[in-house]
Image (cartoon, helix red, strand yellow):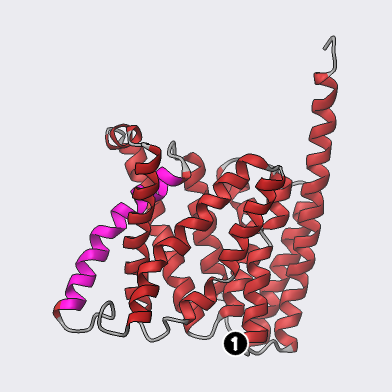
């Protein structure tokens, strides 16, 4: 259990510090960063699969049109999420990206209701209502819809929904998704190289190494998270997930000097309150389930 918690903390910490990594490549266009992130992630996960000798799934996936279609859709959502995040960070919108990942758990609840026929519990409805108020307050306060945050939340939420119905595991699924995307990524990077606009190998050793390392910083937290998810309870994962957007928020305000105005506070505050309510409700639900299971484990039952 302790190793699982440590792995979860490390995974979400690495995700939370990612803005610093993308900021270090601010001179590289977001689309080029996305392409390198895709290709190097594929190489990393293929290495992990080779070490584990996990290849049997390829034949099964290739012979299943449903699996291929799900992977194609999830690959599109993943690329949209990655591109929006990289662009937002390098365009001075770290706070907006943190907001997106703050509200992602609530978006997951909404998607569960819409697509998986799950029912909202009372406190979940309260939390969702507060989050909607926060989004409305941000829209009114800034006179603009918070599209960055909502794009990140819904693209990642829909991605998670597709991964839930996919028969592939996290590592296998990511390898197929990045494999699909790499076909386009290689073509784009070849075009950039041909036109003399490529950054890899032409924009300093540091930038080249950072582009190559994008696969590690993408796949390593995922592997740590996959390990943690098998070791700890869902309620614990639910609490740990706020490490990432909190670190992003702190980086945006304290390191990159993004303005956290009273208007933003008015929008963030109800969303933070919604997350507290949502988390407490999740913990109570976990305790209730354990209480129901415990009598069934007693001798004679």
Q: Residue at x 75, y 68 (%)?
A: 272
Q: Residue at x 66, y 57 (%)?
A: 9
Q: Residue at x 36, y 39 (%)?
A: 67
> Of residues 46 and 283, which is closer to you in this image?
46
Q: Residue at x 75, y 88 (%)?
A: 262
Q: Which secondary structure is most common in the magenta stretch?
A: helix
Residue 118 in the figure: left or right of residue 208 = right
Above or below — where is 154 with respect to 283?
Answer: below
Asked if residue 279 lies in the magenta stretch, the reply is no
Q: Quadrant of the C terminus?
A: top right
Residue 211 in the figure: left or right of residue 254 = left
Residue 176 in the figure: left or right of residue 270 = left
Q: Which residue is mark 1?
A: 256
> Of residues 153 and 4, which is closer to you in this image?
4
Residue 182 in the image: state x and y as whole percent. Answer: 28, 59
Q: Quadrant of the N terminus?
A: top right
> Of residues 118 and 189, which is closer to you in this image?
189
> Of residues 49 and 171, which is closer to you in this image?
49
Q: Which of the 4 image quadrants contains residue 62?
A: top left
Magenta stretch in the rendered image: 171-193
Residue 251 in the image: state x and y as whole percent. Answer: 63, 80
Asked if residue 183 lies in the magenta stretch, the reply is yes
Number of residues whose C-alpha sits closer than 10 Å to that of mark 1, classed few (under 14), some (14–19) or many (20 or more):
some
Above or below — where is 200 with respect to 156?
Answer: below
SS state under label 1: loop
Residue 102 in the image: state x and y as whole percent. Answer: 66, 66
């Amino acid at each position: 259990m302790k190793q699982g918690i440590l792995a979860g903390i490390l995974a979400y910490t690495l995700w939370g510090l990612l803005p610093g990594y993308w900021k270090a490549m601010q001179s590289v266009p977001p689309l080029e960063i996305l392409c390198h992130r895709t290709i190097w992630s594929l190489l990393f996960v293929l290495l992990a699969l080779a070490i584990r000798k996990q290849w049997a799934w390829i034949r099964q996936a290739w012979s299943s049109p449903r699996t291929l279609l799900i992977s194609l859709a999830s690959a599109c959502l993943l690329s949209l999420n990655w591109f929006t995040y990289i662009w937002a960070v390098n365009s001075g919108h770290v706070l907006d990206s943190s907001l997106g990942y703050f509200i992602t758990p609530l978006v997951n609840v909404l998607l569960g209701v819409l697509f998986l026929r799950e029912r909202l519990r009372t406190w979940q409805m309260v939390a969702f209502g507060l989050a909607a108020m926060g989004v409305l307050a941000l829209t009114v306060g800034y006179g603009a819809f918070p599209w960055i945050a909502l794009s990140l939340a819904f693209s990642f939420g829909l991605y998670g929904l597709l991964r839930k119905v996919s028969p592939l595991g996290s590592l296998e699924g990511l390898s197929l998704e990045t494999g699909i995307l790499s076909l386009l990524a290689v073509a784009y990077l070849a075009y950039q190289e041909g036109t003399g606009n490529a950054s890899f190998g032409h924009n300093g050793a540091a930038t080249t190494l950072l582009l190559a390392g994008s696969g590690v910083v993408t796949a390593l937290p995922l592997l740590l998270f996959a390990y943690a998810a098998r070791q700890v309870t869902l309620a614990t994962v639910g609490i740990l997930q706020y490490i990432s957007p909190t670190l992003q928020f702190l980086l945006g305000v304290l390191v990159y000097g993004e303005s956290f105005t009273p208007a933003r506070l008015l929008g963030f505050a109800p969303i933070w309150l919604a997350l507290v309510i949502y988390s407490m409700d999740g913990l109570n639900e976990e305790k209730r389930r354990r209480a129901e299971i415990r009598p069934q484990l007693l001798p004679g039952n």
